[in-house]
Image (spheres, helix red, strand yellow):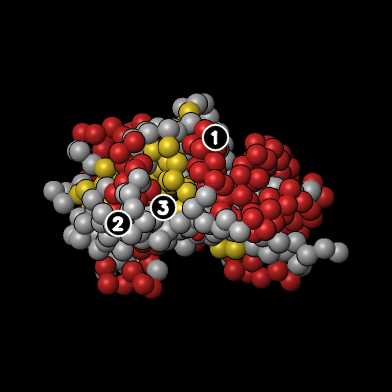
Amino acid sequence: MKQILLGPPQIDKADVQAVAKVVKSGNLSLGEETIKFEQEMAKFVGAKYAAATSSGTTALHLAVVAGGIKAGDEVITSPFSFVASTNCFLYEKAVPKYVDINPQTFNLDVNKIEKAITRKTKAIVGVDIFGYPAEWEQILAIAKKHRLLVIEDAAEALGAKYQGKKLGSLGHPTVFAFYPNKQMTTAEGGALVTNDQSQYKLIKGLLNQGRGPNLNWLKHLYLGYNYRLTEIQAALGRSQLKKLPRFLSKRNQVVKWYNQRLVKVPGVILMQANDPDHERSWFVYVVRLDKNIDRNKVIQKLGNAGIPSKAYLPSIHLQPYMKPFGFKTGDFPVSESVSASTLALPFYTAMKESTVNQVCETLKKVLK
Ligand SMILES: *Cc1c(COP(=O)(O)O)cnc(C)c1O
């Protein structure tokens, strides 16, 4: 029997050919593939501009630098996320001000944001965790009222819609990511999209060693970075992006198969369903286990039966490297309890109904 993986990418012959063509051409960086990938990404999400980057993390960092977030500035963000949404401003020595999450959506609890704002608050980095859109109407209203910068980490949410609009089209800088476990991949890679032309130009310069867009190769306007995506990756991205609508609908189908089988299983809580304002793009299939269930035992028993699963995600404020900030258990109780009970099951575009069935039957057995 084939080994079941947690979240492998979906790669086909066309992807391989697209990559091979670029490798053979010898044009490996700063070329047409990247420009076209950027244009196609912008079009897909409904933004004016997209800048391709070497990862989602580097795109987030660029948004922070371009936004002028500096040492000592406070940034409001979610503790229930992948570390990149916090690290992007730690690189600039800004200070995390976590706000606890909503227990249903796992995104920032917008009713708690204003209490966290001080005179030092500079920005909100909102995350669309597990592909579910955060409460952008409220976040943007709070940001406007307090004159805060907004950066959106939509790394897990490519294709998701908020109030009928694709994430990335709302105007503020929004970041996507293409690591192999994401909805589409460029191996490593990311993109920052925006509707603001001057911001876009600044980002394009920053990711290319601080060069101005039309300037001499050896003229550097500001301290920049090498955060470029390669032509090889851009070619893979273009090939993947063509298939993305199909990928997303297949992922929706896999979720339906899972939900049908797990909706009535005692002790298993499914993720927040869509509503007219929120259309998730499925990144991972995560369930919450009742707090009386020993999650580690479940993971171990699933593993013994050949089914990988993962405690996903830990809360960032309790990560060992965050120690200097002095956070402690109990600071963000909702995030912590979600972190203690969520379980990621195998989930990928090509997943078959029979495999979903095998995972669900095994999980049911393990829970008994
Ligand atoms: C994947 C991801 C990123 C970016 O990750 P990279 O590996 O740097 O591309 C950022 N934020 C979140 C929430 C993510 O899941």
Q: Secondary structure at mark 1?
A: helix
Residue drawn at (54%, 45%) of the image: 32
Q: Quadrant of the N terminus?
A: bottom right
3D distance between C-alphas at marks 1 and 2: 33 Å
Mark 3 beta carbon near ligand 1 (under 8 Å): yes
Label 1 belongs to which residue? 44
Image coords of residue 129 (percent x, y): 48, 48
Q: Residue furthest front?
A: 216
Q: Badge 2: few (under 14), some or many (20 or more) residues near its Cα, within 10 Å?
A: few
> Is the C-beta of the residue carrying label 2 under 8 Å from the nearest atom of ligand 1?
no
At label 1, which amino acid type do we have?
A: Phe
Q: In this view, which residue lies farthest toward the right?
A: 1
Q: Is residue 258 above or below residue 58?
A: above
Mark 1 or mark 2: name the one nearer the start of the chain: 1
Question: Within the image, what quadrant is residue 26 found in?
Answer: bottom right
Task: Between residue 50 and residue 20, name the one nearer to us.
Answer: 20
Tell me which amino acid carries mark 2: Lys
The vertical placement of 44 against 232, above or below, is: above
For the question of whether residue 368 can be seen, the reply is no
Q: Position of residue 337 (x, y in %)?
A: 45, 57
| Residue at the left extreme of this rendering | 119
Query: Left of 63 or right of it: where is 353?
Result: right
Q: Of tags 1 and 2, which is closer to the observer?
A: 2
Residue type at tag 3: Ala
Which sits in the foreground, 223 or 243?
223
Name the residue tied to disc 2. Answer: 219
Of residues 360 and 108, the one drawn nearer to the viewer in this rendering: 108
Q: Which residue is mark 3?
A: 59
Circle 3: is it few (<14), some (14-19), or many (20+) Cα within 10 Å?
many
